[in-house]
Image (tube, rainbow, N blue to C red):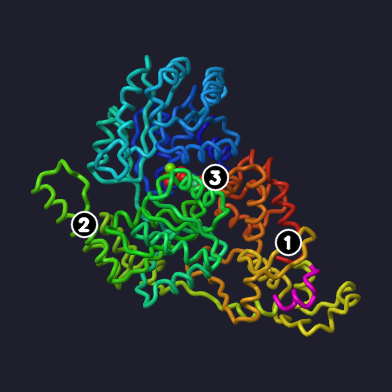
Amino acid sequence: MDKYTALERFFGYKTFRPGQEDLIDSILLGRDTLGIMPTGGGKSICFQIPALCLPGVTIVISPLVSLMKDQVSALLQNGIPAACVNQTMEREAISLTYSAAVRGEYKIIYAAPERLSSRRFLEMCSLLNVSLVCVDEAHCVSQWGHDFRPSYLEIKDFIRSFEKRPVVCAFTATATERVRTDIEKLLELKRPFVSVLGFDRPNLFFEVKKPVNKYSELKRLLDLFSGKSGIIYCATRKKTDELFDLLSLENYNVTRYHAGLSREERRRNQELFASDVRDIVVATNAFGMGIDKSNVSFVIHYNMPGDLESYYQEAGRAGRDGAKAYCILLYSGEDIAVQRYFIDNSNENKELSQTELLNLRRRKLKKLGTMIEYCECKNCLREFMLSYFGERAPVRCENCSSCVGEIRSGDITVEAQKILSCVSRVKEKESAAVVAKILKGERTEHIIKMKYDVLSTFSLLCEKSVAEIEGLIEYLLSVSCLKEDENGFLHLTPKARGILFRSVKIRRKIENPKGNEATDESLFLALQKLRKEIAKKESVPPFTVFTDATLHAMAKSKPQSREELLVVPGVALVKEKKYGAAFLKLIAEKIENGGK
Ligand code: ADP
Ligand code: MG
């Protein structure tokens, strides 16, 4: 199979992203390859496509169980035979996987580095025709990286153990010279083709704010993003817990993550976030590597991190699927004191000499200085970061708060009150479609029969189209102001009562001028809901059904046939077979009762 067929058939994309093709070609030509690409750049496809094109099996070494599981589940969703082996599996399950592998049932096998010292794993490998070994998150091999894993040092022996040396490729988002040379050396790459890709992430909007009251600013932002998935980073565990408690009390759909929690709770909370059961995770920087969740729409830093490298990496966890996403840093003078405290009280590197320690401290303070400059920067924020990372950038990006101002939002309190009181007037016994028609002022048979046309809420939103009103209702459902029962009837929630009786305000985000063209938001929300239902039924992470970027594209192009659906980026053959009918049906229904 050639790479274009693989891209289209198994991933549903028509074109490669910049850099992907060179890396794939190099691997296919049998050359060791090192790919350095920003988070979300699309590294996985660079080794998964060669794995599909090459004969035999590809072994992928990946540091974290959760990463591994998500990737394998995404591959299976696309009809690619893959499996993983890791320490959380029962012995028996591992044995079964080994025998299936030997029978030739998999093209791709993910393994944790610890496996490499298992005799049985090595035995299995010797029975397979391994044509490619891929080391994902390859910076883990370097002590200069931020996630050093000693077991990564064993990879080179693993590679040596093959009678016929497979091609070796390695991928990471860490670009520093030191880490790069470490990877080449410690993995024993042979004359590798190395590709370092641009660090710009055009779909991310950057904003810095110095609010008087951080907490109320945070809530304002969360309301803008309601229904979307996001991460809030705090500098300390204590702050993380505090914020988590406050937000939980106010009924935000949050979970939390930091190194002080038990292993079990961390695993559980991460799962809740990955599966979209919780929209928001409040976390320290311990949260990150293990998440491959592609539909994170915002990353808010409640505290300033210690350096720009960390900031860019953490913020970069937003928008991995290429959809528009927001990175906002809330900054205060106090943050500087906290970071200084960290620098003066870090007890790492015990083996360093006094001079080395002093040098280290000086470097850290310098980095902190740059971070503060970023927070105070009045010019283009993207330009500031990219030039810091040694890249040229235009003077204005038109996609950050310095260039275009802060994210704007619309107050929809009045519209929401009209809709909610209409729901209450019909005694919570009607569907969204009927409520929308009443508010529009349509006199259908049902509406006349039920005497809804004499209600005070009749035709209260006559200036809007039925589709627009339905969009608003969909939005209120997505932010839990309304809920639907099994008959499809709308009901008020406690949040709705706040808006109706306690003059709580509700805002809805208006896309930034440079946002993804106005896609049909209400259709998108409906598609998202369907995705969640399917994912729950099949116990897979929602983003492995379709990514947000794919749902946005669907909402925009409104495909009405299988052929049209297959053209949408991210809709591959197998997924179309599995889910196509349900999504087409929903789109058809939406078009029917609302026009385009
Ligand atoms: P990385 O490992 O570099 O952080 P991933 O491999 O997880 O990034 O890819 C991030 C997202 O980009 C995924 O949702 C993936 O489906 C998408 N993607 C990758 N390649 C392409 C492409 N050629 N066209 C469109 N989307 C792509
Ligand atoms: Mg990756």
Using a 10 Å C-alpha cutoff, classify the residue at mark 2 as few (fewer than 14 neighbours), some (14 to 19) or many (20 or more): some
Quick one: label 1 or label 3, which is nearer the N terminus? 3
Task: Say which residue appears at 60% left-offset and 34% top-offset.
Answer: 79
**Residue kind at label 3, given as amino acid type:** Lys
* Residue underneath mark 1: 590
Q: Nearer the viewer, mark 2 or mark 3?
A: 2
- For marks 2 and 3 on the same chain, the one whose residue lies earlier in the sequence: 3
Which label was assigned to residue 14?
A: 3
Three-letter amino acid code at the position of disc 1: Lys
> Residue 396 sits in which quadrant?
bottom left
**Magenta-colored span:** 420-430
Frontmost of labels 2 and 1 is 2
Give the Cα separation between the discs numbered 2 and 3: 48 Å
**Which label was assigned to residue 343?**
2
Give percent across and percent down for residue 25.
41, 34
Q: Is residue 438 above or below residue 39?
A: below
Residue 37 in picture, x, y percent from top left: 37, 46
Please indicate, yes or no, whether residue 16 appears anywhere in the rendered image: no
Q: Residues within 10 Å of mark 3 (few under 14, many from 20)?
A: some
**Residue nearer the viewer, 228 or 214:** 214
Residue 423 lies within the magenta run: yes
| Number of the front mark, 1 or 3 | 1
The kind of residue on which mark 2 rests is Ile
Ligand 2 rendered quadrant: top left
Q: Residue at x 28, y 43 (%)?
A: 145
